Amino acid sequence: MGASYAAAMSAVMLSAMQLPRLEIALLAVALVAFVPMSFASDTSKAERPNFLVIYTDDIGFADISSYGGPIATPRIDELAETGRTFTRAHASSSTCTPSRYSLLTGLYPFRNTRAEILQGDAPLLIEPGSLTLASHLAEHGYHTAVIGKWHLGLGEGEVNWNGPVTPGPLEIGFDESYLMPATNDRVPCVYLDGHFVENLDPTDPIRISYRQQVGDWPTGMSHPELLRYTADGQHSGTIVNSIGRIGFQHGGEAALWVDQEMAEKFTERAIETIERAEASDEPWFVFFSMHQPHLPLAPNDQFVGKSGYGLRGDAILEADWSIGMLIDALDRLDARDDTLIIFSSDNGPVLNDGYNDGTLRDNGAHDPSGPYRGGKYTLWEAGTRVPFIASWPARIEPSETDELFGQVDLLASFAALADAPLSNDVAQAVDSEDLSPLLVGDASRGRELLVTQGIGGQAIQDERWKLIPANNARRNFANHWTKRKHGGEGNPLTSPQITAGAYLFDLIADPGETTNVIDRHPEVAERLRAALERIREAPQP
């Protein structure tokens, strides 16, 4: 049975189960896609592909079934079955804002001192007029769109959510945007369509503060009885949809999102965007930035209890459904062979991050970091080594590679595939390498060196060795880290704190980073330390 036929059958079965509030348009996508189609046609190969980047949030290396995880993700697995699976691909950072910044700019996040986890009212992180993945592709004839989580700042500070919110994505190369302004655990809990809050009632203006309560809406601290699950103090601000948030909001009631409908909203908008771009016959780039399984966890009721791994597993099922709907839409539009799909995550996993939602209890024996150490926030390998799949049936043969690849390389690689390579004199995107041959399977060589970062500094690795230098600022995120086998008897997912000394690991012999071998190989450590310093001192854009 063909891959697209199986995908269509899956969508039809899900539709028949009557997902709550599922739009008629999405049902039509699944039903039309039921007609079997050839998945790879020699006549439909695109010289300049469309680009669909599917960026999940806090997915770990072993959360996907094609990477050996226990949670069934059949639609993501289809991408692996028809594409190239990377086992040594990295986000640029173990936290989300820096990784997103790096993906779009082709710069390591340490080059911008503001590239850290942003508040919901932070100003735009990327300077308008800068070279970005979106601006470069738009300049060369692509229709560009970002849909979903943003978390790269908006406006110029002190945002007035009741008028045009600018600058934003439309000022850095995107032709259209439909956003969650920051994250699903932060206010404002509204959708931003272009420059304007969707469904805002002008008689009920929005007020936002991250310093003090505004208005009289209940908070998690004042009214814990209204919460679906309790949270720590940081996540006990204004209650929206029975969930406490970071920060305080008052007003904009008609514009508030419903968490359980978020996947549907973003998926529907992405499909509509792709349909319009296909009708215009211009190539397109869609950055589909998902919120799953970032906390708070509130998947659609259709998925609750279905994964066997609690709400976090259920949210991963929901993400897999969204991805399947996008695949089905591409099949229906006969655009699958013309589209390079990238699936990945912004950083590694986290299980205990502020909400008492049962994740630690329900996770069971599943280790979302797989054989690697650490998780979100950390400099350990699982902080940035994430699933990464490149699927383009007309060009990429099913394969797997363990070559080193960074999400920072997507800008230069996409530019090359779009027949619009970056010029040698471009002062921006200095960290992005053209690894398009590796991406599509025409070559086997990856990066020689890659820098990643976490809370407390950077690490550098080559094809064998990884150095975490001395004198990085250290912070203990024991309550967030996800490894059982490196932990103590307190929090079952505790991992030892990185201390002030330097670490050198042989990732070939010791992928779990269990043994520091810096005393045995001081010359390797010095070579990597010097290389990291050279990279840090590269000319700033």
Image (cartoon, rainbow, N blue to C red):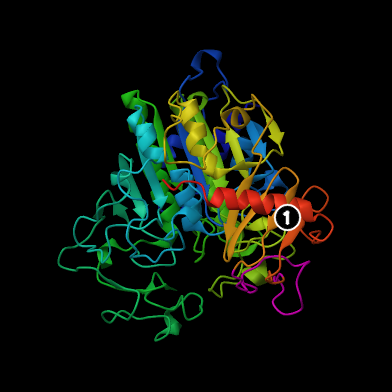
**Residue drawn 46% across the image and 57% down it:** 97
**Residue drawn 44% across the image and 55% down it:** 112
For mark 1, what is the residue?
Answer: 370
Where does the image place residue 464, in percent across and percent down from the top left?
A: 76, 45
292 with respect to 180 (left or right): right
* Residue 495 or residue 110, whichever sits in front: 110
- In the rendered image, the residue lying farthest to the left is 203
**Residue drawn 49% across the image and 32% down it:** 414
> Looking at numbered disc 1 in the image, what kind of residue is underneath it?
Gly
Magenta span of residues? 473-495
Which part of the image, by quadrant, shows the C terminus? top left
Name which quarter of the figure residue 409 lies in. top right
Where does the image place residue 245, in percent across and percent down from the top left?
A: 42, 72
Where does the image place residue 358, in percent across and percent down from the top left?
A: 61, 72
Name which quarter of the figure residue 375 lies in. bottom right
- In the rendered image, the residue lying farthest to the top is 43
Q: Which SS type dominates the magenta stretch?
A: loop
Is residue 481 in the magenta section?
yes
Can you say whether 147 is above or below 197 in the image? above
Can you say whether 376 is above or below 130 in the image? below
